[in-house]
Image (spheres, rainbow, N blue to C red):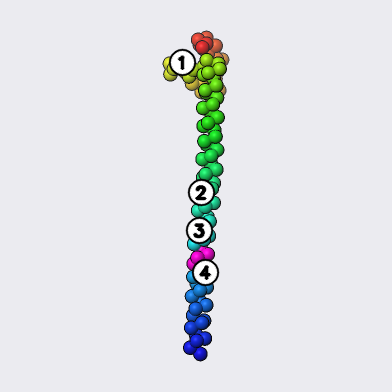
Amino acid sequence: MLMFVACALGVVTAQHETRKLNMALENEMEITRKLEVEWGKLQLEQSTLIARRQIENSAREQLNMEVPSADHIQIISARKMDEAQWAVLDHVEKF
């Protein structure tokens, strides 16, 4: 009878340990999935930056283009403009 109780306690302990390990495994798998998503985003960002750099290098080398200085950059609002504002823009010095 004592051996039966010892075996039953062993089974219960093993089942409990198995549940704890399965929960830990599931948590680690969730972390792995999140890290894989993050890695994919970083790879996409890196390829975008590389492509942007390649375009800039091609523009400089093949077309002899360069980034304009701050005083040659104009920012135009996307809001609706009236005719008088368009007339002013028509007379702005072209680069």
Residue at 51% in and 48% down: 35
Mark 3 closeness class: few <14, some 14–19, many ≥20 residues within 10 Å: few
> Which three-letter amino acid code belongs to the residue tagged 3?
Asn
Mark closer to the chain start, 3 or 4: 4
Q: Earlier in the sequence, mark 3 or mark 1?
A: 3
Q: Label 2 amino acid?
A: Leu
| Among numbered discs 2 and 3, the one appearing first in the sequence | 3
Residue drawn at the location 53% of the way across and 28% of the way down:
52
Seen from this angle, which residue lies furthest bottom? 1
* Horizontal and vertical percent position of residue 77: 51, 23
Given this view, does label 1 or label 2 mark the residue nearer the observer? 2
Q: Which mark is residue 35?
A: 2
Q: Indicate the amino acid at tag 1.
A: His
Query: Depth-wise, is mark 3 or mark 1 nearer the camera?
Result: 3
Q: Nearer the viewer, residue 32 or 76?
A: 32
Circle 3 residue: 27
Which structural element holds mark 4? helix
For label 1, the crowd category at 10 Å Cα-Cα, with few meaning under 14, some 14 to 19 and many 20 or more, is few
* Residue 46 x %, y %: 52, 36
Which circle's residue, 1 or 2, is located before the other in the chain? 2
Q: What residue range appears in magenta?
A: 18-23
Q: Is residue 24 above or below residue 14?
A: above
The Cα–Cα distance between marks 4 and 2, rounded to whole angstroms, is 25 Å
Give the distance between the C-alpha atoms of the residues marked 1 and 2, in whole angstroms.
43 Å
Q: Main secondary structure of the magenta part?
A: helix
Q: Residues within 10 Å of mark 2 (few under 14, many from 20)?
A: few
Residue matched to label 4: 18
Label at residue 72: 1
Q: CA distance from mark 3 to mark 1?
A: 54 Å
